[in-house]
């Protein structure tokens, strides 16, 4: 198993970042090409569906699906999901939030992957996802003053 990690500092309070990360509205907004289906409770199923306009994608209706289980949902601290590694190449994906002294939020993302090759692929895509989370949460913070 190989773990890749990325971190981002977000200019928003931890509540705003948590809401962006752990609500369907927030996740759909920052993920852009994905929709999320879940009831946001530990142990519940979570499904990310992306519609891809790529002829190389051999999925039904050009949709890619990541099906998992919410392993941890500790408000303002941790959001983790487990996956079938044969389908996603990942065992677990976790987001850890830390409130910084100046009111900003640090988000550390860890992905436990089945191989270095898979970890390298997620290492390219992962920072894009956390950057989109950052941009979305910061827009909300500016709008709400959070």
Image (cartoon, rainbow, N blue to C red):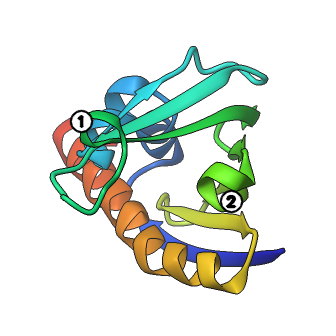
Residue 37 — which label? Answer: none
Q: Are marks 2 and 1 in contact (CB under 8 Å)?
A: no
In the orientation shown, which residue stands out farthest toward the right? 1
Above or below 28: residue 123: below
* Left or right: where 90 falls relative to 59: right
Q: Position of residue 35 (x, y in %)?
A: 34, 32
Number of numbered discs overlaid on the protein picture: 2
Residue 17 location, x and y as percent? Answer: 45, 45
Q: Would residue 138 be found to the left or right of residue 73 on screen?
A: left
- The residue positioned 24% from the left and 45% from the top of the image is 32
What's the residue at 35%, 51% (across, down)?
A: 58
Residue occupying image coordinates x 37% and y 54%:
133
How many neighbours does mark 2 have within 10 angstroms: few (below 14), some (14-19), or many (20 or more)? many
Q: Can residue 73 be spotted in the picture? A: yes
* 124 on left or right of 78: left
- Residue 11 seen anywhere in this rendered image of the structure: no
Question: Would you place residue 30 above or below residue 131 in this image?
Answer: above
Give the structural element (helix, strand or loop) at label 1.
helix
Q: Residue 88 placed where, x, y %?
A: 60, 54
Mark 2 vs mark 1, CA separation in Å:
35 Å
Q: Nearer the viewer, residue 134 or 64?
A: 64
Quadrant containing the C terminus is top left
Residue 144's label in the rendered image is 1
- Residue 83, given in percent of the width and then of the height, sits at 70, 45
Q: Which residue is mark 2?
A: 90
Identify the element where label 2 is drawn. Answer: strand
Residue at screen point 31% across, 59% down: 132
């Amino acid at each position: 198993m190989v773990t890749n990690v990325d971190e981002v500092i977000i200019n928003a309070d931890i509540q705003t970042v948590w809401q962006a990360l752990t609500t369907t509205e927030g996740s759909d907004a920052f993920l852009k090409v994905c929709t999320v289906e879940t009831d946001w409770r530990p142990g519940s199923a979570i499904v990310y569906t992306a519609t891809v306009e790529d002829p190389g994608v051999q999925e039904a209706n050009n949709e890619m699906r990541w099906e998992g289980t919410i392993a941890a949902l500790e408000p303002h601290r941790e959001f983790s999901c487990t996956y079938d590694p044969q389908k996603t190449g990942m065992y677990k994906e976790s987001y850890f939030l830390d409130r910084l002294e100046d009111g900003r939020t640090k988000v550390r993302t860890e992905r436990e992957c089945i191989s270095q090759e898979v970890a390298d692929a997620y290492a390219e895509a992962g920072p894009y996802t956390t950057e989109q989370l950052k941009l979305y949460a910061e827009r909300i913070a500016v709008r709400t003053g959070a």
